[in-house]
Structures are given as structure tokens and as C-alpha cells.
Image: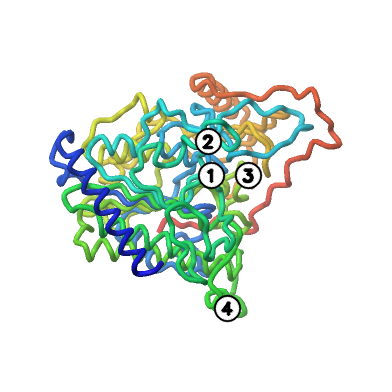
């Protein structure tokens, strides 16, 4: 970005945010200055084993590891879907994708000859819903969105009505219908995304989005709380990285003893390093601006990594029904509240962020909106080690790397139901985190109880189900890819 353009963007952000502050201040329920700020960092295609603090030895993530050491790390945190758009919608709404009827990435796979027909699902979030940024904005927050959006109804008449700025964000830098970088330079300039200057040849998208996020922090009026929502395009393909980092990790791979079966891709490792540098820059900016003590930083992902070996020993990866497709890193630093270096093993999911952030901000819950989310503040404070919730659920009536399925986790137990043939898989995740030993036939009563609970949940959420496909052609239907079996037991990343 040229100095002139960057100066102009900072001035523009300052003017916009100052106007918003003066407009919102009188409507806030309490002094806006007393409310905490939020920096929410969402990483695309983030595997459970991609960070050093989650067991990676090949990737270098000192800043992210430091963030974990300064806050709370979760080792049973989940995305709400095995693909991106539904997971992103769940975070913003506090609702399961099944309830939203936004159950696949936009626009999804087409399998016209498959055994089952996909329901007529939605490719947008209804405007009638009050999203997390809208709820915070009503309380006087400035809201800035940076990066990947992928929540626009491609090919529909109201496409242009669903940018981030149509759903509660004051500013949108980079968000459009894309699920991955598609500009002329992909991850390198030129980028072709909204409100982001192309800068100089060789500039990297992750770095440039972070530049804009830093500008937002530096331009925000100190009297007004803010939500900075940085939704990284990385680590989604195309896998690209600055040449010096590709070379660095090529050299490292030559002598690396890959005891944990990690995914050794020099370009992807470089992407992880630039992500880590971005986190470090944001944390340092908060410190320099004396905002650290009143800013909650949250870092997580939208679905599993896109390769075998990114899941930290869990079974499978993005697009699959098993743990590697949905279990995510989650780090929360809430200064003065979360115990530094603490670890939480209670299962949590993407729907929980909305009510959690409202409670942190001392704002009233909105159960009519975040209908499926549960506040995890008691976990963050250390007041409790469990939540008053019976189960977590997934509903994926679509074809991907997996056949259509539903899943439920109750305590340590997880049941998967495949919709084509009713096949069941039952695992005790405490004893078998890599899901190697299917207990559905040896514990049929437990499997049946969990199946009935899941079916009742589907009824309660009015989940869309699949129907028999009259055009089914077995020879052209496609089939579920053979699930990848973890080569080693899942690593214990709780420490």
C-alpha cells in the first residue's frame, strides 16, 4: 500500500468511526468506554494439529503459542460444520446450520445421480436475524470485518444485499463471495477484493489484510469499544507462500524427523508462519496502543485442515465426518480473567461465541437469536469445568468427501449416522480419539439412545432431510471416499 493511500484509509476510518461513536454513544446502556474490545481471528482450513501449542513440530508458531500461554486453550473445541460457510454462519448467528438451513459451503457440490437428493437449502443468512456484530453495534461498538466472507447467495437476485456491511459491520475490507483468493495474483498482489489496495508486486494477502486491521485499531476512537473480526483467507488453497519461506521449510523438511505424521508442505508451512506473524502484529499493536488489558482475543478455525496430517493424529480432515473434519484449535485470552496457560477439555462449538461475547461485554443474552449457543464464560473464569448442555450436534445433508451424515457428541461418546444406508459408527473419544474402534455393534443400546436423541434434535431444529433421488444411477452416483485411518494414536495436546 502506498503511504498516500494508507494515510487516506486511516483518515477515512477515523472519520467513519468517530461519527459512529458520537451517534451510538447516547444509545449505549452504559459508558461505552467500560466495555471490553474484541479481536476475533478466524482461520480458514485450520487443522487441529497445525500450531506448536497443539503439537506441531514442523510449523513455527511462536506468537500463537505465546497467546495460548497467556490465555486458555481448548482441546475439545469444534466447528459447527465440516465445511466453511455453515460454520461461519453459526458463529455470527449462534445457531446450528441445521436451524439456519445453511448447511453446505456456497454453492456446494452437485451430485445429480446420487442415491439421495439434497434439500433446497439456503445460501444466505436471513436479514431478520440479529447477528453478533449487529448486537454489539446496538451497544455502541465499532465493527470492522477483514478477509473472507463467503456468505453471499451466488446467482440469486439479492446477492448484493449480503456483504458484511449488510450484516452489522461498519467496514468491510476483503469480504466478498469468494471462498478462496481468486484475484489475478491469488495470495499475491493484485488481490481484487473490496477496499484493499493492491500495494506492491509481491505483497502477500495475509500481510495486507493485517495492515488494514492494524489501521482499524490505530484509527478507532479510544472512547468506543470495537469488534475487529479478521477472517483469514489462509490456510485455504491455492497453497502459496513467499518464496523465502518456501525455501526455508524445504530445507527444514530435509532433516525433519516426522514422528507425528505431520503434513510437510513447505508452502503451507510458510502460510502458517505468516498467519503467526499476523497474530503477533495484532497483539503487539494492542500493547502499543495500551488496549491489551481491555481486549479479549479469540483465535479459532472454521473446519479441519485440507490435508491428511493436519489433524494432529485425529481421523480424517476437512469434508469428512470424523474428528479431523470439525475439531479445531481454540485460544481465548481475556486479560485478568482467563488463567494464563490454562487448558479446558469441555466440548464447545462455534455457536457459543455469540452468547459468550455478549456476557463478557455485560450485555443481556438474546436467546431468541443465539438459539443454540451456550455462554462459556464460566469456563473462561475458571468457575466451572463443565457446561449445562447435554450434547453437540452436526447435520450435513450433502455429498462431499463424506456421504451425507449426522453426528452427536454426548460426553466422551460420539455417534455418526450415514443417511444413505443408516450405517452407524460409535466411538469413545476418551479412549479412542482417533476413532479406530467402532462400538456400534457391541454397544447397540447406547447407539440407539444417541440416535434417538439426534433424531429428536433434528425435529426440534426443523432440520432438512434428504429424499430418494428419482434420477439415481449407481454407476454415476459418486461414492464416499475411503476414510483416512490415523497412522498413530491421536496426540495428547492438553498440556
Q: CA distance from mark 2 to mark 4?
A: 41 Å
Judge whether residue 442 can be spotted in this image. Answer: no
Q: CA distance from mark 1 to mark 3?
A: 24 Å
Identified at 25% across, 54% down, the residue is 14
Q: CA distance from mark 2 to mark 3?
A: 29 Å
Label 3's element? loop
Q: Residue 224: give x, y in percent of width and height.
A: 20, 47
Q: Which residue is mark 2?
A: 159
- Select label 1 or label 4 by which is in front: 1
Q: Which residue is mark 3?
A: 320
Q: CA distance from mark 2 to mark 1?
A: 9 Å
Judge whether residue 7 can be spotted in this image. Answer: yes
* Badge 1: residue crowd in 10 Å (few <14, some 14–19, many ≥20): many
* Badge 2: residue crowd in 10 Å (few <14, some 14–19, many ≥20): some
- State the residue in front, 73 or 143: 143
Identified at 67% across, 52% down, the residue is 485
* Badge 3: residue crowd in 10 Å (few <14, some 14–19, many ≥20): many
- Select label 2 or label 3 by which is in front: 2
Q: Which residue is mark 4?
A: 247
Label 2's element? helix
Identified at 55% across, 35% down, the residue is 153
- State the residue in front, 403 or 159: 159
> 201 above or below 494?
below
Q: Residue 322: give x, y in percent of width and height.
A: 60, 44
- Select label 4 or label 3 by which is in front: 4
Query: Mark 3 or mark 4, which is nearer the start of the sequence?
Result: 4
- Select label 2 or label 4 by which is in front: 2
Q: Which residue is mark 1?
A: 177
Amino acid at each position: 500500500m502506498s503511504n498516500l493511500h494508507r494515510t487516506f484509509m486511516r483518515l477515512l476510518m477515523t472519520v467513519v468511526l468517530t461519527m459512529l461513536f458520537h451517534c451510538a454513544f447516547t444509545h449505549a446502556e452504559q459508558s461505552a468506554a467500560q466495555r471490553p474490545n474484541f479481536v476475533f481471528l478466524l482461520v480458514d482450513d485450520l487443522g487441529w494439529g497445525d500450531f506448536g501449542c497443539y503439537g506441531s513440530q514442523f510449523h513455527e508458531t511462536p506468537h500463537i503459542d505465546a497467546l495460548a500461554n497467556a490465555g486458555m486453550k481448548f482441546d475439545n473445541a469444534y466447528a459447527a460444520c465440516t465445511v466453511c460457510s455453515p460454520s461461519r454462519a453459526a458463529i455470527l448467528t449462534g445457531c446450528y446450520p441445521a436451524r439456519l438451513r445453511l448447511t453446505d459451503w456456497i454453492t456446494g457440490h452437485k451430485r445429480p445421480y446420487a442415491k439421495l437428493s439434497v434439500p433446497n437449502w439456503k445460501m444466505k443468512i436471513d436479514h431478520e436475524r440479529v447477528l453478533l456484530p449487529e448486537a454489539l453495534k446496538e451497544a455502541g461498538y465499532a465493527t470492522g470485518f477483514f478477509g473472507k466472507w463467503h456468505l453471499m447467495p451466488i446467482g440469486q437476485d439479492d446477492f448484493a444485499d449480503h456483504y458484511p456491511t449488510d450484516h452489522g459491520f461498519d467496514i468491510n475490507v476483503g469480504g466478498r463471495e469468494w471462498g478462496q483468493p481468486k484475484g489475478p495474483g491469488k495470495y499475491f498482489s493484485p488481490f481484487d477484493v473490496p477496499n484493499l489496495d493492491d500495494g506492491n508486486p509481491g505483497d502477500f494477502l495475509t500481510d495486507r489484510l493485517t495492515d488494514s486491521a492494524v489501521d482499524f485499531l490505530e484509527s478507532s476512537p479510544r472512547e468506543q469499544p470495537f469488534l475487529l473480526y479478521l477472517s483469514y483467507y489462509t490456510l485455504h488453497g491455492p497453497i502459496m507462500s513467499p518464496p523465502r519461506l518456501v525455501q526455508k521449510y524445504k530445507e527444514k523438511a530435509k532433516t525433519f524427523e516426522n514422528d507425528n505424521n505431520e503434513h510437510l508442505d513447505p508452502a503451507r508451512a510458510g502460510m502458517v508462519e505468516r498467519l503467526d506473524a499476523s497474530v503477533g502484529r495484532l497483539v503487539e499493536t494492542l500493547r502499543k496502543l495500551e488496549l491489551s488489558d481491555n481486549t479479549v482475543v479469540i483465535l479459532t478455525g472454521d473446519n479441519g485442515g485440507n490435508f491428511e496430517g493436519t489433524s494432529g493424529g485425529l481421523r480424517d480432515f476437512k469434508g469428512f465426518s470424523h474428528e479431523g473434519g470439525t475439531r479445531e484449535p481454540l485460544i481465548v485470552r481475556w486479560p485478568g480473567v482467563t488463567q494464563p496457560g490454562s487448558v479446558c477439555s469441555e466440548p464447545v462449538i462455534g455457536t457459543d461465541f455469540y452468547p459468550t461475547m455478549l456476557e463478557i461485554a455485560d450485555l443481556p443474552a438474546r436467546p431468541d437469536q443465539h438459539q443454540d449457543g451456550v455462554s462459556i464464560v464460566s469456563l473462561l473464569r475458571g468457575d466451572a469445568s463443565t457446561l449445562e448442555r447435554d450434547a453437540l450436534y452436526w447435520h450435513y445433508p450433502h455429498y462431499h468427501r463424506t456421504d451425507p451424515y449426522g453426528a452427536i457428541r454426548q460426553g466422551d461418546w460420539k455417534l455418526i449416522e450415514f443417511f444413505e444406508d443408516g450405517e452407524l459408527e460409535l466411538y469413545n473419544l476418551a479412549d479412542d480419539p482417533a476413532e479406530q474402534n467402532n462400538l456400534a455393534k457391541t454397544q447397540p443400546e447406547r447407539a440407539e439412545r444417541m440416535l434417538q436423541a439426534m433424531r429428536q434434535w433434528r425435529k426440534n431444529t426443523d432440520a432438512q432431510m434428504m429424499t430418494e433421488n428419482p434420477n439415481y444411477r449407481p454407476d454415476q452416483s459418486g461414492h464416499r471416499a475411503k476414510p483416512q485411518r490415523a497412522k498413530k494414536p491421536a496426540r495428547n495436546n492438553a498440556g
